[in-house]
Amino acid sequence: MAKPFKPSIKLTDNDVTNEDVYMNRRSLLKSMGFLGASTLLAKSAGAAGWFWEDEEEKTAFKGKALEFSQPPKFQITETRTPEDKVTSYNNFYEFGTSKDAPAKNATEFQTNPWTLKVDGMVKNPIELDHDALTKRFPLEERIYRLRCVEAWSMVVPWIGFELGALLKQAEPLMSAKYVAFETLYDPEQMPGQRSRFTGGGIDYPYVEGLRLDEAMHPLTLMSVGLYGKTLPPQNGAPIRLVVPWKYGFKSIKSIVRIRLTDKKPPTTWNRLAANEYGFYANVNPNVSHPRWSQASERRITTGGLLARNRIDTQMFNGYSEVAPLYKDMDLSRYY
Amino acid sequence: MPLRKKTFRLSVWQRRSLKGLIHLFALGYIAWLFFAGVTDQLGPDPVNTLINETGTWAIHFLLLTLTLSPLAKWLPSPEPMQFRRMIGVYTFVYAFAHLLTYIVFELQLDMALVASEIVSRPYIIVGMAALLLLFALTATSFKRIQRNMGKKWQKLHNSIYLILPLALLHFSWSQKTFWQEPVWYWMIGLILMSPRMKQWYVTYQKKSQKKSRDKNAVA
């Protein structure tokens, strides 16, 4: 007769590692001082992800479904960038400088409560709370091309309302010439704002600006969602700007303040390197970035290395209807 | 101060297995990168991932080759020197794959664009200079050529000390701001170079002292 199997070590329920400890074993190890070594190695994480990371670390963001109309004018036929790429390849230095850092570091970002102030040279200052962001204005889906200054591009179905509609309610004074935007400053939640090393050496909060006529243009969108749902934190939740004819860095994220002014406001990247990033930052294939050509771009959709995704960059990113805004301006000087 | 009095040695078998493992890793990783890239498993933008990985690993290998001779002195052991050539050659292999990725997958063989980018963008010129030097070192890494070159070989291979700052400058310059990943590599590079720089300084002082003595003697 076969002998019944007897384990040589007797374990009781008490010896079992708690499930949540087990599930968090990586973060435990990291907090025990491997942080230094792992930051060196893990830089390339998105890259060779499976090499040293496991899946359960990523908690997928679940957006709330939004109600919106789909004006046919903005339902372009270009292949959309898949949702998981739009939400995992981000420049949002407040959450780290690598492309995959924001999706990882922003999972706990609190966007409720939120206050967006519209003030400065206006007759009627406005404050929007978290719910008002998605309720005060009828929402539209607009599929826009997004052209990054780094010479890659995406096609994104944004959901939002025209900035013009918001500004009209605030009633800008005749003297107002520019609109200044400001991102939330909260180093507790935004690790990039804590030190030069994690935030790329940018002076926070991130600030941007538009001329008033650019801000009032019907293409200029305040976005609160993408792919039918509220924005994931890494894409600028709860509300961000989208100016599709300008390089992506103009489209400031997680906005807390919009101020009307009569002076040209400072803008973050221009302050950091004025020879590389101008105030206007219109997409322009004829004006190179000093370190790379802007004549063409790689469109990120699907397909691996062999996808032939380099396409010609169009003036104003193909939104030629904005050209009259810059009539008689030398765009190689005002880049 | 050396770690031990006795010289540390590996057996032939140990040395061979270690070399085998290094080959396996270096070749395996680059083969996997290209395979995963072609099959779209390298994240949202496979081209960007591949460029970053080949570039940073070229720098990892470069820093590793520069650790070997201080390590040999410190242990002390002749063993690390047995690995210098192979890791040096992999530095070139990864750096070359980095350039190929840029030309074939980033610029997608638009040769007019390749030519204009390579001549007109300073950070690319710096990177190309480092790569050309690495090529010269790789091409002269055969034992027979080394013997034939005699003293000149060492002179040429000292250009590794130029390649390091060129490669790091290229890395830093390619970023949108200074305070990013490359800063760590500059720090490691500086640590690796500090004993050598001290040595150079001492040699330089001795030389200039001798020169002034000779001068005085003549006078």
Image (cartoon, rainbow, N blue to C red):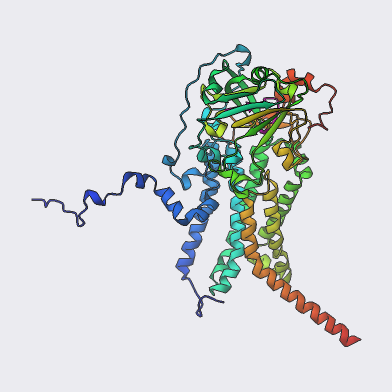
Say which quarter of the image contains residue B207.
bottom right
The relative height of residue A1 versus residue A216 in the rendered view (above or below) is below
Image label count? 0
Q: Position of residue B11 (x, y in %)?
A: 46, 71
Residue closer to the observer: A16 or B35: A16
Task: Give the quadrant of the C terminus of chain B.
Answer: bottom right
Residue closer to the observer: A137 or B136: A137
Task: Give the quadrant of the N terminus of chain B.
Answer: bottom right
Q: Residue furthest top?
A: A72
The relative height of residue A179 versus residue B173 in the rendered view (above or below) is above
Q: Position of residue B21 (x, y in %)?
A: 48, 58
Task: Name the residue rendered at 73%, 23% in the picture.
Answer: A214
The relative height of residue A302 versus residue A52 in the rendered view (above or below) is above
Residue A240: say if magenta: yes
Task: Name the residue rendered at 16%, 53% in the picture.
Answer: A6
Please give the range of residues in magenta.
A239-249
Q: Position of residue A72 (x, y in %)?
A: 60, 12
Residue B204: say if magenta: no
Say which quarter of the image contains residue A314.
top right
Q: Is residue A48 left or right of residue B185?
A: left
Q: Is residue A302 visible?
A: no
The relative height of residue B175 versus residue A174 in the rendered view (above or below) is below
Q: Residue furthest left?
A: A1
Q: Is residue A46 visible?
A: yes
Say which quarter of the image contains residue B117.
top right
Q: Position of residue B188 (x, y in %)?
A: 61, 60
Residue closer to the observer: B137 or A302: A302
Q: Is residue A229 left or right of residue A288?
A: left
